[in-house]
Amino acid sequence: MTQSTPKQPARRGRIFPERTLSPEELTKRKAEEEVFHRRCRAIFERVHPDLIPEHYGWYIAVEPDSGDYFIDQDIEVASQKAREKYPNVVHCMFCLNETGTTGRI
C-alpha cells in the first residue's frame, strides 16, 4: 500500500517582494509611456498618408527623438532596421493602414 504525501500549502505573495513597485512609481511609468506613444503617434500621423498608397499593410518602426522611421513588409525586419541604427533606444511599431494597429483583437 502506498502512502500519500501531505499536500503542500499554496504559497502566497511575490517571489521578490523587494522588487514591488509603489503605486506612485506605476503611475509615473504609465504617464511616461503615454507621452512616448503620443510622440510616436504624431510622427506616424504625419508620414502615413504618403506611405499608405505604395506600402499598405507594411510595418513602420518610429524613433521619436530623431523623427526617423523604418518600413518593411516584415515586422521583425522593420524592428531590426531601427535597432541597427539606434541600438539602445526604444522604438514604437505601427502598421501602415488607416488605424496603425499591428494586431487583431
Image: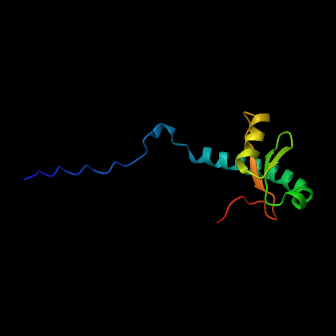
- Residue 46 position in % (x across, y down): 90, 54
Residue, far right: 50
- Residue 87 position in % (x across, y down): 74, 33
Residue 3 higher or lower than 98, as above or below: above
Residue at 82 percent across and 44 percent down: it is 64
Q: Which residue is nearer to you in this view: 56 or 60? A: 56
**Count of numbered tags:** 0
- Quadrant where the C terminus sits is bottom right
Residue at 87 percent across and 60 percent down: it is 52
Q: Which residue is nearer to you in this view: 100 or 8? A: 100
Q: Classify residue 19 as left or right of residue 98.
A: left
Q: Which residue is nearer to you in this view: 20 or 23? A: 20
- Residue 93 position in % (x across, y down): 74, 50
Residue 102 higher or lower than 13, as above or below: below
The answer to whether residue 66 is visible is yes
Residue at 66 percent across and 64 percent down: it is 104
Q: Classify residue 29 as left or right of residue 50.
A: left
Q: Which residue is nearer to you in this view: 18 or 15? A: 15
- Residue 59 position in % (x across, y down): 77, 53
The answer to whether residue 86 is visible is no
Residue, far left: 1
